[in-house]
Amino acid sequence: MVQHELSTERLLLRQFTENDSEALNRISNQEYVLNWMPDWKSSIHGTKRLIRFFIEQYSIANKDSARVMFAVTLKDTGEIIGMVGVGNKKEVDNEIEIAYFISEYHSGKGYITEAAKTVSNWAVNHLNLDYIIAIVELDNYPSQKVVKRCGFQRIETRTILNSGEKEEKPFYYYRCYNTPQG
């Protein structure tokens, strides 16, 4: 069973509820997000179906099959400002990948790094993984900074047909290894 909440200094990362549909839809349809994650473009009905899928996944996530998405919320207001989670990435040998996005209005403040670092640590420990991956487009400099700050190491460049894309293109392939907690 997945832990329902993770807390950081400024954020509460919590399980999505159907009441989050409008906020998630508004953020995921921003051009700022769609530039890097075009497969998140959706109608409100599509977002509601996606959140129902996320809710179903919380209870069955494991080392071999994970699709755990958290709402990134500000502790002081409860406002949803983004999404962070892990899931199997079929385009990359079904390895477990971290994915995230943040509203354009809250970018550049370190929130998504804070959230991604927390979820990365949670995923490798809770799901007992040797590592998780990130794939980042070569010109997505903000995301490259996030994964580096979270302890990911760039391994290589891979050409991938990513979900939501029409043709293959190069991505940096990163790994964050599970290190024993001392």
Image (spheres, helix red, strand yellow):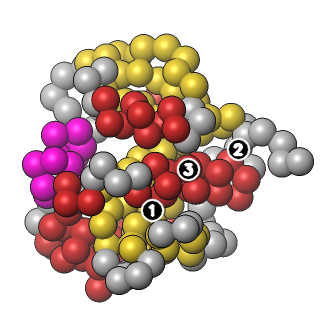
Q: Nearer the viewer, residue 179 or 45?
A: 179
Residue 32 in magenta?
yes
CB atoms of marks 3 and 2 within 8 Å? no
User: Separation of disc 1 and disc 3 at Cα?
Assistant: 14 Å
Q: Amino acid at mark 1?
A: Met
Which residue does the image show at 52% across and 38% down from the upper left? 149
Q: Amino acid at mark 3?
A: Lys
User: Label 2 neighbourhood size at 10 Å, few (<14), some (14-19), many (20+)?
Assistant: some
Q: Position of residue 54 (x, y in %)?
A: 42, 67
Label whose residue precedes the other's in the sequence (1 or 2) = 1
CB atoms of marks 1 and 2 within 8 Å? no
- Label of residue 129 in the image: 2
Q: Amino acid at mark 2?
A: Leu
The residue range painted magenta reads 29-40
Which residue does the image show at 56% across and 66% down from the upper left? 8
- Residue at label 1? 69
Q: Nearer the viewer, residue 93 or 176?
A: 176
- Label of residue 33 in the image: none
Location of residue 51 (image quadrant): bottom left
Q: Is 97 above or below relative to 169?
A: below
- Residue at label 3? 117
